[in-house]
Image (cartoon, rainbow, N blue to C red):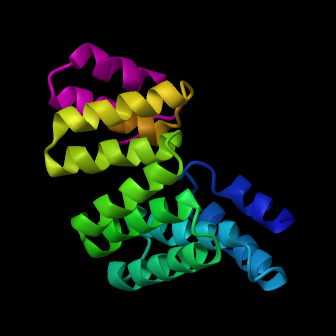
Amino acid sequence: YDFLLRGNYHFNDWNASEQDTGTAEALYTRAIELDPRLAAAYVGLGSVWVHRIDRGWVASSDEAGDKAIRFARRAVELDEFEGNARLVLATAYFFGRSNYDQARAQLGIALELNPNDYQSYCFGGWMCMCFGDLQEGVRCTEEALRRNPLLPDNCLWTIGVTEYLVGQYDKAIEAFGRMLSEDPE
């Protein structure tokens, strides 16, 4: 469990650097070596691979997506009520396989299992924005903000872009202005 917590420290809110992502992977792997039934460590490994896909740090999105899906499925096998595993499956299907139907289905299960998870709402906002369902994207991002008023930059970025696309420029500027880092995007 200690290795899991250390991995989470290095992989915080999907904003980890490439070096921190590698450190987190090693720590999650060590946690699994010590306790092969620790579902949350498999969630961590799946998240690491999705993050690498999203950041362009992989040679093959298909291979990285397969790894992310394999780790998340193992977490579900170990704990069927682990909502974060479903969120990782959703992101893996979205980024690694471009399978939007599976991504939506897994996100729906994640929200059923944990209806207060701001990260699931934040990803739902991102996904809806990409699908062109901007009003649902705004709704999801508002739900994320309602659950966590101290959202990480990646969620604030999603809110900013979604609000911009629906013409709510003041809200977009507000979301971007709350970001802690100067995101080049």
Chief SS of the magenta region? helix
Residue situated in front as seen by the camera: 36 or 19: 36
Q: Residue 106 falls in which quadrant of the image?
A: bottom left
Figure check: 63 above or below 95: below
Position of 118 with respect to 132 (left or right) is right
Q: Residue furthest top?
A: 170
Which residue does the image show at 75% across and 83% down from the upper left?
Answer: 36
Residue situated in front as seen by the camera: 124 or 81: 81
Q: Position of residue 176 (x, y in %)?
A: 38, 26
Which quadrant holds the C terminus? top left
Which quadrant holds the N terminus? bottom right
Position of 110 with respect to 13 (left or right) is left
Q: Which residues are magenta?
A: 159-185
Residue situated in front as seen by the camera: 110 or 55: 110
Q: Position of residue 41 (x, y in %)?
A: 68, 70
Figure check: 164 above or below 120: above
Position of 139 with respect to 83 (left or right) is left
Q: Position of residue 113 (x, y in %)?
A: 52, 53
Figure check: 107 above or below 89: above
Q: Position of residue 72 (x, y in %)?
A: 52, 73
Does the magenta-highlighted stretch encompass residue 102? no
Which residue does the image show at 33% across and 83% down from the upper left?
Answer: 62
Which residue does the image show at 57% across and 80% down from the upper left?
Answer: 74
Looking at the rendered structure, the number of numbered marks drawn on it comes to: 0
Which residue does the image show at 45% across and 51% down from the upper left?
Answer: 112
